[in-house]
Amino acid sequence: MPEEAGFPPAKRFRPGCGPPGGRVLMLLTAGGGSGGRRQQPALAQPAASPYPEAVERQRRSLPIFPARGQLLAQLRNLDSAVLIGETGSGKTTQLPQYLYEGGIGRQGVIAVTQPRRVAAISLATRVSDEKRTELGKLVGYTVRFDDVSSEDTRIKFLTDGMLLREAISDSLLRKYSCIILDEAHERTVHTDVLFGVVKAAQRRRKELRKLPLKVIVMSATMDVDLFSQYFNGASVLYLEGRQHPIQVFYTKQPQQDYLHAALVSVFQIHQEAPSSQDILVFLTGQEEIEAVSKTCRDIAKHLPDGCPSMLVLPLYASLPYAQQLRVFQGAPKGCRKVIIATNIAETSITITGIKYVVDTGMVKAKKYNPDSGLEVLAVQRVSKTQAWQRAGRAGREDSGICYRLYTENEFEKFEKMTVPEIQRCNLASVLLQLLAMKVPNVLTFDFMSKPSPDHMQAAVAQLDLLGALERKDNQLTLTPIGRKMAAFPLEPKFAKTILLSPKFHCTEEILTIVSLLSVDSVLYNPPSRRDEVQAMRKKFLSSEGDHITLLNIYRTFKSLGGDKDWCRENFVNSRNMMLAAEVRAQLRDICLKMSMPMVSCRGDVESIRRCLAHSLFMSAAELQPDGTYTTTDSRQPVAIHPSSALFHCRPACVVYTELLHTSKCYMRDLCVVAAEWLYEAAPDYFRRKLRATRD
DNA sequence: GAGCACTGC
């Protein structure tokens, strides 16, 4: 048994509780403490309620309910507002209904945006149930591949990415009277771009004396200064929630080995706590999670008598769906559930019954390196808000306990907030979308958290190479090709690949390849069965690279009618395969709307490779005399990723889809090309490069 | 020579 990790006495806190100092313009409290008995709302029952009693009672018991009148009175007169409400306050399901019932925003549609599809769908279902209407009538939702809304829809839930798409065809968002940006604290790229788009639409509509646009930003955390300032000093409304108290323990000493510390903590809890109380452990990635899960199971086998048994469940996004679902099933009586997860359990997946959270304080996340212009995936410290979010996962139904595997001193040194994604990612897509909306002066776009000028410039350079940009009167605008690229829900380089494909008579094939590349990997690689996987995959491998290999797999899958058993036997992720087929159909529709010819090159694989060379020429690498590879763009040393079909080959020249920095800089998804094809594709670009290397 | 956080259009 490992020795005790050593935790000092607990500090009590309630995550996100209490108003932010000095910034609250109005305070709306629901009454009642957290976790304890709640005050009954003192308002009179409406004369004739349209709701069945149970639903009505449930709605009235939510913390937001006593604030209803005050909330409506305030919101009626405000253009913009920020609403802070903890988990469980009922803000997301109730506020849109209150607005509708109060006759606010009835001249148009009330939109509520969500970062995730599942959330948009389940919230719409919930609210339409409460309104006792059929989903898609009064209350509906719109997410990619699934639009359940109609002319009658007045309350619409949509993903933030979907609303952005709509802004391309109508940048004033004319059909909406009110836009509620929910989960704003997550600061996804899409939400961040929407902030700017919605703010501009609001101002422009005012200038044009059109229907005013009301904007409500909803956040679960207290750091709202930025939101309020950004929306011209918008009022901040505070709602108390239903979070239960959580005890937090820190370690006395910094931990050298967080995996070891996590194991110690799990078994310390396991020996002390009743077996009905489940544990959630936060680690950084698949490999680590699988290794720790195995160790946990091994140790659990050799525990002393009287110790409860243990059900260890890994949880990460690339885990097959059926295995993900196991975390929702209760463990047998006398058995404890231990869930070992990535940050997928921070926001995306909520598990009930968690009493203990073990937080290693580490996360694997993308960083942006402005010098090299590259994204780097690296294990790093979480931010304070992230640590609170993790702790909060222990207090969903009852009071909880969080063990932090770092000292309080270390915690104080964590970044206050996670750096918004928009400052950590490639901006080519964002820029293309803004240009498609005809935003004037894109380079000075009013972002809430501005990306650095270098960062923006790198995106301009990328779009320029793809032939998407032109300059008119010192303003950046889109070329006809650029406008077409923006129509595809894809990274710009993939959109360009599709647009080039008719020239190489391989549109059908390119559509398949691009679809497969734009979903999560269809190749399932359980580390414990590596040899089996390699043996099965051999029959699809192409010496011409990963794109052709993927095409081979898709063709076999299709010829068998999408057989799930075949997928399992061949270590193919059937969920992602189906998704790729759906993406392909959508992309094909867009091509047909543009009157692109649907052509196939049949067995002529070379034309596919030529097409890829012409669209990915800026991501190429050449074999050096010493057997290593160097990128043609920045002469950076790179290596072939071990997952590639070309891992054991050494082609002279390749293009790749992605660079991945882990222990080395790896190229992923490679295609063998001829050097002269690259030169043909962009003679000026390569002439510049050659001159640069000579200097 | 040896490895892939999480969303979304």
Image (spheres, coloured by chain):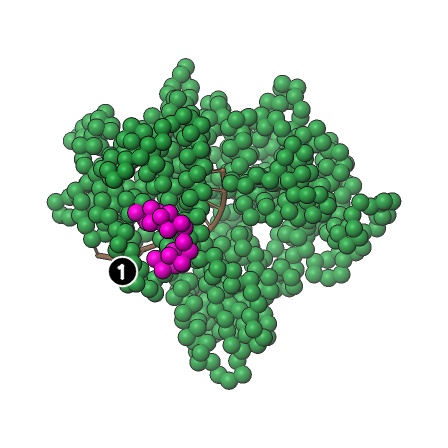
Chain colours: A green, B brown
The amino acid type found where label 1 is placed reads Ala
Q: From the image, give the main secondary structure of the stretch colored magenta.
A: helix
User: Magenta part of the protein: which range?
Assistant: A552-571
Q: Which residue is drawn at 42% across and 44% down?
A: A581
Magenta highlight on residue A674: no
Instruction: Tell whether A444 sits left or right of A16.
Output: left
Instruction: Tell whether A335 sits left or right of A290.
Output: right
Image coordinates for residue A655, horizontal then vertical, percent: 25, 40
Residue nearer the viewer, A557 or A475: A557
Image coordinates for residue A661, horizontal then vertical, percent: 32, 48
The residue beneath circle 1 is: A535
Residue nearer the viewer, A644 or A661: A644
Up-down: is A503 above or below A514? above
Magenta highlight on residue A564: yes
Q: Which residue lies furthest to the top in this view?
A: A473
Q: Residue furthest bottom?
A: A305
Up-down: is A595 above or below A66? above
Element type at marker 1?
Answer: helix
Image coordinates for residue A409, horizontal then vertical, percent: 49, 59
Residue nearer the viewer, A508 or A168: A508
- Quadrant location of the N terminus of chain A in the rendered image: bottom left
Q: Which residue lies furthest to the left in this view?
A: A625
Q: Residue at x 44, y 52 (%)?
A: A575
State the count of labels.
Answer: 1
Q: Residue at x 45, y 60 (%)?
A: A283
| Res. A85 visible in picture | no
Circle 1 chain? A
Rate crowding at label 1 as few (under 14), some (14 to 19) or many (20 or more) other CA atoms within 10 Å: few
